[in-house]
Image (cartoon, coloured by chain):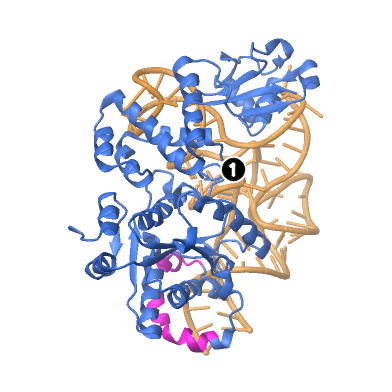
Chain colours: A blue, B orange
Amino acid sequence: MTAFKSDFLRVLSERGFIHQISDPEGLDEACRTGQVTAYIGFDATAPSLHAGSLIQIMMLHWMQETGHRPIALMGGGTTMIGDPSFKDEARKLLTVEDIDKNLEGIKRVFSKFLDFESGRALMINNADWLRHLNYVEFLRDVGRHFSVNKMLSYDSVKLRLDREQSLSFLEFNYMILQGYDFVELYRRTGCTLQMGGSDQWGNIVNGIDLGHKMERAQFFALTSPLLTTSSGAKMGKTASGAVWLEPDLLSPYDYWQYWRNTEDADVGRFFRLYTKLPMDEIARLAALGGSEINEAKKILATEITALVHGRATAEAAAETARKTFEEGALAADLPTVEIPRDRLAEGLGVLVAFVEAGLAGSNGEARRAVSGGALKVNDVPVSDDKLRLGLGDLTGEGVIKLSQGKKKHVLLKPV
RNA sequence: GGGGGAAUGUCCCGAGCGGCAAAGGGGGCGGACUGUAAAUCCGCUGGCUAAGCCUUCGUAGGUUCGAGUCCUACUUCCCCCA
């Protein structure tokens, strides 16, 4: 935990990425004296990674930054099984088509954080070796090294067992495949370190053991703390709760907003984890108190957005927010929904308008929002749910601004 | 193979004498207070052409004026015995 000698561990440590390391001194020494190759696996359970994976991506980034070689391992093979760690029930099986499609979206993110030029970072898909395994051979070569007694003792499966929920044999194999991945990557690239969230500890340690037995190699594990916001525990489960990294799934403006609304207490921690700003700069920003911390949050949001969506996009989002919140003006870059001019000309019900804008899930939900005073048209609260919008409601800019609450705004644009 | 349980509002947990759009909680959303924060308080949290109508309690049938609730079969899961 104390002073690391290698740049890599020192950076990770001071920025708060480290939760557990299997052999801190050994890893520190290895990082100090040579180039280490490490990997983190990403399963393709959704068409994009979300904010929860950002911490993993940043670890790979810092690794490359400090002179080592990161591998982003795409879980095209492991996703066929589904990781049961700390899950209270089995996930629905995805089809091969879905998995491969999801991977397309996931791959895209990494080029923004890693430099894949001339093998400085690698992207490998474990489908390459897992999807064509020979069952009996695999059991004899790899399976014999695993003790079921031991696997049953891991905390990661205890939740399931304690709740008396079924843990299928399929899922039970996940940690074996993950362990095998580690060995396979070692053979292919000399990879000796696996990183991941703290929920992956058991799986990673299994890989270390397997490395000892099959290759007589010294592997290392390094885990990061789990992101703990109120919604963190169920992250990725609810459709609206996930903060996607792909602009198609979550607009850069909304992404910026997400970070802008960071709790005071999280500001320093998020700066260290999710931005590349130097530590002294972060210390200064995090020390701001009272309402001044809002300035820090804006910088935080812009920095994090810039990493994922690019600097220009991030600054545009910041500017849109500034106009909307600080000037109360109508910013042209707010998320826009197009609507046929004819429909507007003949009169469009407010409820329908809000549903089409994506600010309400149904007419009924919009109706309730009206009675709760939550909806506004051009900043004027809606009091009558039978109100119809027409061409006369267009502002000088030729749009209609719909708002739900204080923070969500959408422009309706006739075409 | 035999015996006994369980499945509830398509976010989760969970109560439910045959009259139920179904208690309660978490989460989420909105309002007040603030600083686009936290904490706190209040409201909402099946759908619709809305004083009415439609669809919901694992699946399919049945009993009944009426079924989440009773019966039968099936599915999945748990426990006990072999």
Side of A406 relative to A213 (left or right):
right
Read off the magenta span: A138-165
Report whether residue A72 is seen: no
Task: Say if B47 sits above or below A113 in the image.
Answer: above
Task: Say if A75 sits above or below A347 in the image.
Answer: below
Q: Residues within 10 Å of mark 1 (few under 14, many from 20)?
A: few
The x and y percentages for residue A62 are: 36, 54
Task: Say if A269 sits above or below A210 in the image.
Answer: above
Side of A13 relative to B58 (left or right):
left
In the picture, the quarter occupied by the C terminus of chain A is top right
Q: Magenta stretch: dominant SS?
A: helix
Report whether residue A8 is seen: yes
Instruction: Verify whether residue A141 appears in magenta.
Output: yes
Side of B56 relative to A251 (left or right):
right
Judging by the rendered image, the residue that carries numbered circle 1 is A249
Q: Residue furthest front?
A: A118
The chain to which mark 1 is attached is A
